[in-house]
Amino acid sequence: MEFDRRRLLQLAGWSGLAWLTPLARALARQEEAAPSGAPARSLILLWLDGGPSQLETFDPQPDRPIASGTRAIKTALGGVQLAAGLERTAEMMESLSIVRSLVSSEGDHQRGTWLVKTGYRPNASLLYPSIGAILSHELSGAGVDLPRHISILSDHWAGRGGVLGDEYDAYMAGDPIHPLPDVTARAPDDRYQRRMDDLAVVEDAFARGRRALAERTLHRQAIAGARRFMSSEQLKAFDVSQEPAELRAAYGDTPFGRGCLAARRLTEAGVRCVEVSLGTWDSHIKNHEIHDRRKAELDPALAALVGDLKTRGTLAHTMVLCTGEFGRAPQMNRAGGRDHWTHGFSAVLAGGGLRGGQIIGATDPEGGKEPHDPRPVADLHATILTAFGLDPAKEYPTPIGRPIKLSEGRPMPELLGASV
């Protein structure tokens, strides 16, 4: 019996690689060819809101006191383990890389979120743009009617445009199973058109004698963009019901699973950055129970997303980043929880021309504050920007008159190879 190569790889991407024959594994590796050197085009940020524990996810320390009973499992990458509960992700490990030694200076949820999403510590004098806003600003959006920056399931602290402008704020969407907000006119067509005609009269009157000021408001452009969005065929990218039932089941019948599937569809439509949130991982009490529930949603969605992108041949130019605002303390507190920890937490990356199968740094197995090979969050940003063909040292102006760089970090050569 002769297998169809594409079908075999689809099954690998949807169900994991554990059951596949050596021949199928070889085909999967062949499909994931060496990066062509072309820059990444889109970023999918899987945001683990609330600060996931590195020890119960991507940097387990089995048989150590700091594990507090958390088991580790083998992965497809020899010598690398993940925490139990991430079995499907473990099968995709050859396509993933993990930075296990991120360090942050912010232990508060909101401030930590801003730091990880922007690469800069929060500053009262200006709002730094998030990575999604930077990519949307720096890279062309020609031919795309959809917002270039989209956040799914985030109920707070979604990516902002900051000093680049509010037009680069993430468009907020909920569970893809529900209708999109603000895309349907609230009046019948004839009445809606009369309102648009009346608005044009008001805009013309305002612009008379103050053309330059009217142009600076970008009001006409904003209205035109909103109308294109409301009527665009590209809105179908949000509709995950168009995907095969088998694939939807592989992602998981959860809001997060559907959000990840929608993210894949949106990046194919040309969206630069899609952020999908999964919360909450805040585990000051019942740490293990909370992480078991969250991993049950994360594991199938993350594995299916990476496998799906591989199968479709789009992983090379679509980057996946999975992380949160900080990690969790090595020592359990009296309530069976782990408190905030900024001295070494994990980020998982895949695709976008980055090397797979790389492990950078590690939690101190004795529970100390200094991880092995610490990397500041800014280095993560510099690495992503470089993979997208952008210069992290590029400066842009700010309202306070002081130019700032896209990133003050240094790219990680382990992930970028000869490109740095």
Image: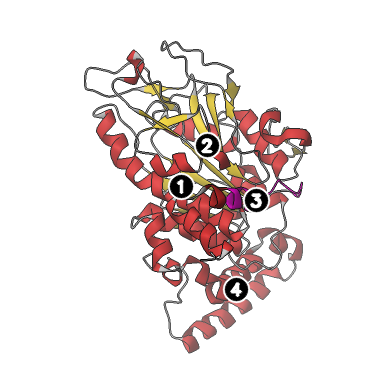
Spatial CA span between label 2 and label 1: 10 Å
The residue that appears at 73% across and 48% down in the rendered structure is 39
Disc 1 marks a residue whose amino acid type is Leu
Tell me the residue that label 4 is attached to. 228
* Magenta region: 26-38
Q: Quadrant of the C terminus?
A: top right
Tell me the element at label 3.
helix
Q: Is residue 44 above or below residue 187?
A: above
145 relative to 210 in the view: left or right:
left
The residue that appears at 46% across and 77% down in the rendered structure is 185
Q: Dot 4, crowdedness within 10 Å: few (<14), some or many (≥20)? A: some
Residue 196 image point, x, y percent = 56, 79
Q: Which mark is residue 348?
A: 2
Which is more foreground, mark 2 or mark 4?
2
The residue that appears at 28% across and 30% down in the rendered structure is 288
Spatial CA span between label 1 and label 4: 32 Å
Spatial CA span between label 3 and label 4: 40 Å
Disc 3 marks a residue whose amino acid type is Gln
In the rendered structure, does residue 28 fall within the stretch colored magenta? Answer: yes
Residue 357 image point, x, y percent = 59, 35
Give the mark nearer the N terminus: 1 vs 4: 4
Tell me the residue that label 1 is attached to. 302
Which is more foreground, mark 3 or mark 1?
3
Disc 4 marks a residue whose amino acid type is Arg
Q: Is residue 111 above or below residue 209?
A: above
Q: Dot 1, crowdedness within 10 Å: few (<14), some or many (≥20)? A: many
- Tell me, yes or no, if residue 274 can be seen here: no
Which is more foreground, mark 1 or mark 4?
1
